[in-house]
Each structure stands twice: as structure tokens, then as C-alpha cells.
Image (tube, grey):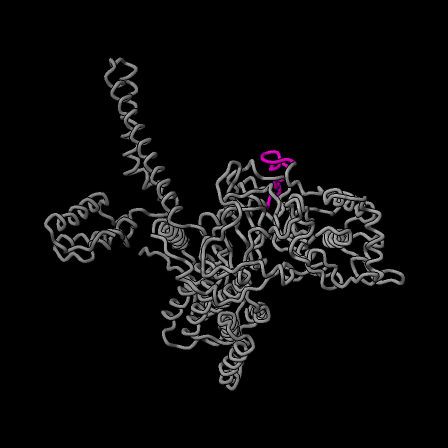
Amino acid sequence: MWTEPKRPRLNLAELHQLRWLLGTLLAALSAWTVPDMGIDAWGWLALITVAAPVMLWRPAWSTRLPGWAHRLAFPVILGLAAVDCRLDPGRVLPALVRLTLMLLLYRMVTARKRRDDLQVIVLGLFLVVVAGVLSVSVVFVLQILAFTACALLFLLTITLADTAGGAAEAPAEWARVRWLVLARRVRAVANWYVVLLGGGLFVGLVAVSSIVFIFLPRFEFENSLFLSRLVQGKSKTGFSETVSLGAVTDIQNDPGIAFNVDVSDRAQVPATPYWRMLVLDDYFAPGQFRISSALMGTLRVTPDKTTRFLGTERRPRAGASTWTVYFEPGISKYLPLPGRFGQLMFAEQQEPFNGNAELGVVALSRPPTRMLAYQLDELDLTTPPTEPVGETDESGEPRSAPKNPDYLDLGLLVKNDERTIWLDKMTAEIAAPMSTPEDFARRACAWLERRHLTAMQVANEPAEGLPTDTIVRWLAGTQPGHCEYFAGAFVLLARAAGFPARMIVGFKGGKWNSHSENLVVRNSDAHAWAEIYDAKKNAWLRVDPTPGADVFGSLTGGRRGEAALQAMTDTRFGARFDSLRVFWYRRIVSFGQDTQVRLATAVQQVFEGWGRGLKDYLREKRVQFRAWFAQPWDWRRLAWGAGGVMLLLVGARWWRTGRLAWLRRRGADPIRREAGRWLARLAAGDGADAVTLRGSLERLRYGAAPTWPDPAKIFRAARRVAARPRAAGGSGLASPG
């Protein structure tokens, strides 16, 4: 008797081995979402990373943990969590994430039962969701997809193991695993039709989730998920109130993206944008600048949570543009600003923050823990910052010095000190009598360029006969320096010559991504420059003393628009991946009701266009067929028509008989398969015809071929019997399979 061979199955030990593998991978995958949160948990993450391959290499070690260790595990974990909360009060979420990592680590190194496997899934889901809320990164898409696929396979394996073994304990041989042998066994038992079906269902689930995301009404993300408020933001860079020599240069060693910028008017983009973040006016220690308390006092605090901050350009004017900045998390609490603006709009409400539009500084309450989007309206890139007018002379013009005395302060340098003597001698070489600020800036930058080259590393060790102050000693020598040395040296020289000056830190330049059409500014673009005050213009002139730079930073001149963008275009292959990040920020993270309506309208228009195109195509073909059919029929047209009819008849005949022979030659017996299908369909029928047909169908399914009745006759009878109850409204047969 012919029977189909049974498909091999995994035994209970192999199912437990597969369950152990998937559980360990799921725990490790979940743990590696923590770096995206900006939470300090590298110690526990390192332990999990080491434990995962070790426990896969030696699963038997999970069964050797003594009983007293299990009894002490949870008290110790809770004790460590309590100490963590005590050492870092007020930061609930980081302690909770580290507690989750400890629990995952414990579950990875101990033998797990069914409920323990479910705990791994729940703990991992918590980490993935928190990472998605805090980072809103495009990497989250890959993480959630990988986690979902692994978790579904894990649940399937748990279910199969429970079905195969019931409530029995795992056999002892499960720990003696050989992964290559297990991989070959899984490949042998895998039903690829089921695998393809599962993959299709997973892709369909992702597609449906995307459609739901697009068309469901939007809600206020900040109000619904408050996790970002539980993390104390910390700056990853040296952009803080105090900047030492080398702090900005250290940022330049990081190639990561600092922020992306969408521009509304490409013609306004300069060849070298300057992004000011912080103004440092107090030289309080050798080689160290900071924002003074007087200048800090000019930053007004917003009264309450708000989404906007008013700037200096209050009226719309020709040539102004709108730029949208996507600021990466953890860079700084100071926002990069390319120029004067009329209004700064945040995508979400912000905690009360400080800002001074005239100074060009906006400081959040803390560094953002996830991507921060804000829009700059009425942006003006050509007008320099101004100083509030204080006392004026007899002619009504402002006096030479601004109200803030720190702009002329040399800090630790006292009059007649050896360091001031050095500065006086240098400024005598630079400044001509009655020099203007612009003239002094050009002369000082040229003097610095003649004496010093640029370098990332500076050897500026103390030496006998040279000043003890770091910057003055560097000025006295000829060592190369980086941007902070040049900017700090210019500030000291200008103040010694009687010109108010200050240091500015931020970013310079950027690259144009032609794939997503936006500016990309990286941490490696970090820069320091200076500003000198022109009393007659009441303006702080930008001065970039670093050799090779335009002295006044192309404030009013230089290339702009397409010529500038062409010179700035990023030609690397990695620009395609950067454009994906920008797409994520534009369409997903910043996806609001306006974007939703536009996208839904675009989708509707596309489908309506396809529908109209299909209707027009069918209408055109129908008209062509009628015109062709109405033409006189000659022998050629009759021959073509007869040939088409014969082709249809041959195709129908092949479908009824030749297809079966073709399948039989490929090793399959379509008659037996068809008989099996009708047996399953007529299984619930209890009429006499159904009982008789089941006997004939069983012979076709299991009997030898010479004993078969006419298959076509039996199948036609089965079709009539199956259709009869449906026509009469009965339910004597099973529903079609």
C-alpha cells in the first residue's frame, strides 16, 4: 500500500537546545539596545556580551549553579538596585534599566523553565521599547524587527517543547549540544512552505503596522510617553560653560553626526556656515575660557514650558529663509544657531530654558536625551550680532567698550606682569596707530599665520624664559596649534590692544547630502573662533584666525546657493545611509497630523491615478477590439481566429490531462493528492453517496494504481456531492480546504 513518508521531527532534547539558543540570543539582542538610551550601563552590558557565547558553548554550566546561589540571587540583585538608586537619586529610569540587565544576566547563566523564558521576552521588550522612546533612532527599526522575529521563533519553540514533553523536565542530554549537528537537524525537519508562509505573514504584519501608523490619528508623543524625563541628560562633548584648550579638538576626533539641517531656500546657503553655540568671555585660568556670570545673567528664562522662542528678526523680509535642525542627543544643551532669527519653534514642548537672541545663545535645561527638532524662521545669515547700547559720547555714538567689562578683562594677567609685557610687545608689532577693529583683525590673523601652523596635537610645555600662561607661552613661540589656540590667542591680543573680544565655540561648515537634500554637520566639524567689537557699527565681527580660513568667515560675501552646495556635496557611499537617517527624522519621528494628511492625500492620489489609468487602458483596448472585430473577415483573419481558439483548447486539455502527467514525471502523484483533498472535504458527510465516494477515494489515495476506478469520474461525483448540501442550505460536509 502506498503511503507518504513521515517528515522527521526534532526530539525533546533538540527542542530544548533550540530554546536555549533563541533565549540567549534574545537576551543579548535586547541588552544591546541600551547604548542608544544614553544610560551608563557598560559594565553589565560587557558581562552579558561575554556570558552569551560562554553559555552557548557550555550550556551544561547553567545546571551546576548550587541551590544557595539561587536563593541569594534575587536578594543580591535587589540590594544592588537599591544601592544604585541611593548613589544616583532622582534618576529612576537608569537604575531600572540596570536592574533589567542584571535580571537578564541571571536568566542567561541559569537553566530556564517555561516561565523564565517568558520573563526573558518581557524584560527584553521593556528594553527595546525604552530604547525606541529615548533614541527615536533609525536603528530602532532594525532592533524592533529583529527582536520581534526572534521572539516569535522563541515562542514557537517553547510551544513545541511543551507539546512534545508536556510537563516533563528537560532530558539531561539537552546540555550536550553540538550546534552544527542541530543546525543540520533543523534544516532537515524544516518545512520550507511553512517557513515562506511565516515570512510572508511577518512581512504582512510589518506592512499593516506601517499603514496603521500612517492613517491612525496622531497623539501627543511627549505627553503619552514620559520616559525621556526620567533620564538626566549629560553632554557628550566639550560644549559647556567652561572650555579648556583641547576640549573642542577632542570633539573633532568623533566622526559621528551632530545634527542635520533642512533648508527652505538653497540660494541662502553659504559656502562655510558657522554654527555658534556658546560665547566665552571670561579668561579665568591659564588656557581656560568660560561664560561669565554677567553674560550668563543676560540669558532670560522662559516663564513656562513652551514650543517657541522669539528672536531679533521680528518682521518677514525678502531673502529670509527657514531652516529645520535635527539635533542629535547628548551633544550639548546649547543649540547650534547659524545666524539671527525671527522665531525658534520646537516640535514639542520644552522645559523652561535660557536664551538671548541678541547674543545668539539658546541653552536648554539639560542636553536632550533623544533627537531634538527645532525650526528657525526668518533666518538672517548676513547680519552680525549686536550689543545693547549703553553710554554714548557727545555725538550720540556708543562708547568704544560695551557695557560688559569682561570683554576687556585679561583674567589672571595683571599689569606689568611678564605675560602682559609679552602681549604688549606683540600688539605693538601688530597694531598700527588708530587701527580699526577690522584692520587689527586682519593684521593679527596674518601675524598668527606667519608664526604658527595648524596641528591637532600641540607640544606646549613650560620652559625657562617663557611665560607661564599657556596661551601667552604659545604666542611667544612658533609651535603649531589648533583652532582653540588661535581663537584664544586672538582674544588676548585684541584685549591687550584695547579691543573688546570674546571666544565663540560651535561648528563650522558641513556637507551637503544630495540624496536627501540636507546639510550634515558632524562632530568633526567642531570649531572655535573669535568675535571683535566694532563700536561704530555696534556689531560683533566674526574673526576666524585659524590659518587657511577667511578672516571674517564669509559673513557678507563668498559663494552661496548652488555653487556653494556643489563644493560641499558629500560624495561618499555612506551618504546614502545618512539620507536614511534624515528620512526617518522627517517622515517618522516628526510625523504629525499635517504630514499625515499630506501623505494620505498623496497615497489617495496615487491610487486614484492608477485606477484612472487602468480604466483608460481597458477602455482603449475595448474600443480597439470592437474596431478590429467590426472589420471585414478575410481568410487571414479567420486563420488567426481559428489558431487562437485551437490554442485555448490545447491549453484547457493540457490543464486537465497533460498537467497531471507533467506532475507525475516530477515525482508527485496528483491523483493521490486530489483524492486526499476530497477525502478531507467529505469527512463530515454522512449520506450514502458520501460513504460510497469515500471508499473509492481511499482506493485512489492508498491503493495500487491498477485497481483504481476512473479518477475523473470519481472526482466529478465528489464535486456534485460536495455542492449538493450547499445548494440546499445543509451542513453535512466539511467546509472546503
Q: Which residues are magenta?
A: 558-574
Q: Residue furthest left?
A: 728
- Residue 432 % position (x, y): 81, 44
185 w.r.t. 257: above or below: below
Q: Residue furthest bottom?
A: 68
Q: Residue at x 34, y 49 (%)?
A: 215
> Quarter-wise, where is residue 502 in the image?
bottom right
> Quarter-wise, where is residue 88 in the image?
bottom right
Q: Residue at x 61, y 39 (%)?
A: 270
- Residue 426 % position (x, y): 83, 51
> Does residue 218 appear left or right of residue 573 in this picture?
left
Determine if residue 219 is in view.
yes
Residue 149 counted in the magenta span? no
63 w.r.t. 262: above or below: below
Determine if residue 104 is in view.
no
> Quarter-wise, where is residue 366 in the image?
bottom right
Q: How many marks?
A: 0
